Amino acid sequence: MIAGVLKEKTGEQRVSLVPEVVKQLSQQSVTVWVEPNAGALAFYPDDAYTQAGAIIKPAAEIVQEADIILSIQLPEPAIWENLQPGKILAGVYQPLYNSRQMQQAADRQLTLFSLDNIPRTTRAQSMDVLSSQANIAGYKAVLLAAYTYSRYFPMFMTAAGSIAPAKVLILGAGVAGLQAIATARRLGAVVEVFDTRPAVKEEVMSLGARFIEVEGAADASAAGGYAVEQTEAYKRKQEEKIAASIAKADIVITTAQIPGKTAPQLISQEMLNTMRPGAVIVDLAAATGGNTALTKNDSTILHNGVTIIGNSNLAAAMPADASKLYARNLFNFLQLIIRNGQAVPDFEDDIVQGACITHNGAITNERVKALCG
Ligand code: NAD
């Protein structure tokens, strides 16, 4: 069988397969075709792919001939519209936010696997693209904030006087948030953290940060570890606590998301007005609406001296390692759908089932099906 690697859309620097993984697939009798310059922006040149056993082919040929097409984001419209029935696609397609394309994929008889939909179980950890990429985003968010901030992160006692450590507030202690805490702590900041899931308190404390407690969170135990929407009474209490921390914060990293929904707005304009000039906010939830009232996706704005950076794709800002980890996640997933060099997905497997969004002309994922009516 042929696996085809597409160059990502403009603005995306990562690539879905790196040469070391091409080699591993070739050893499993999979022929890998790679679009010219697919890995160039992640510093994986075409030569490295050919040395690993891949063949460089134009996108049009990949779309026609490959059995399975690999990418990160949804392919460019020109490619998407030319995909022939029976093709298998694997990537991170955010099906709950792209239901129209999912319906098109079903109508065109594509078998589409979206790796952001695999269950968050121990067995699936090696394929968990959300985790590998969120980890990078959390790390980069703090570095970006530190770079933008006009003061030091660590405390310093110098002959010229003392510098107080930066106060960092992190909203949402999932994978990105936890890495942001660790990175900010390594840089010497004092860190406070808030999350609606009380279960993360111990992890937060073990990283040396303070956990802001709000009583009465909605029970999220049936949501597979994800957050759920909260009651109005809880939101009010949460707002008061966050407002008190915001007014003192130098840096705020926001990561709060609810799968399939608009991100919760945790920082109102009034709260932003209380912030110190020079403070920096990095909002990782920008693509789904943002956690602040003024976040603009893929933009940086200045409000009363407060810089608000809206970026939900910070993993792409570290494209070499992001691609390497993504490619390994993808390779591990492909082990569940490739046998003896042929694509034979095991639809009984809970990970394959979770990732599968369309198959045999139908939407197989219940939540996406409900969105498509
Ligand atoms: P995410 O990106 O969906 O959300 C980020 C964080 O924001 C979460 O911790 C969430 O609780 C929090 N949040 C949501 N609404 C909020 C609000 N109103 N106020 C404050 N915080 C809010 O999360 P994620 O990083 O993808 O992780 C989701 C879950 O999956 C976590 O429980 C994580 O531990 C779990 N997980 C499990 C595995 C595994 O076992 N294989 C792997 C990765 C993640």
Image (cartoon, rainbow, N blue to C red):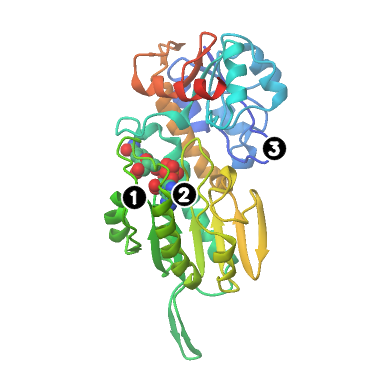
> In the displayed structure, would residue 148 be above or below residue 34?
below
Query: Which of pointers 3 and 1 lies earlier in the amino acid sequence?
Result: 3
Question: Compared with residue 55, is residue 9 higher up or lower down, i.e. above or below?
Answer: below
Q: Single out the mark in the foreground, 2 or 1.
A: 1
Residue 217's disc number: 1
Q: Amino acid at mark 3?
A: Thr
Q: Nearer the viewer, mark 2 or mark 3?
A: 2
The residue at the point 41 percent across, 25 percent down is 333
The residue at the point 57 percent across, 45 percent down is 313
Q: Nearer the viewer, residue 54 or 147?
A: 147
Task: Using the image, determine if residue 241 lies above or below residue 359.
Answer: below
Residue hosting label 3 = 10
Per the image, the residue denoted by label 2 is 256
Number of callouts: 3
Q: Which disc is residue 110 wearing?
A: none
Residue 334 left/right relative to 13: left
Q: Residue furthest front?
A: 233
Distance between mark 2 and mark 1 Cα atoms: 15 Å
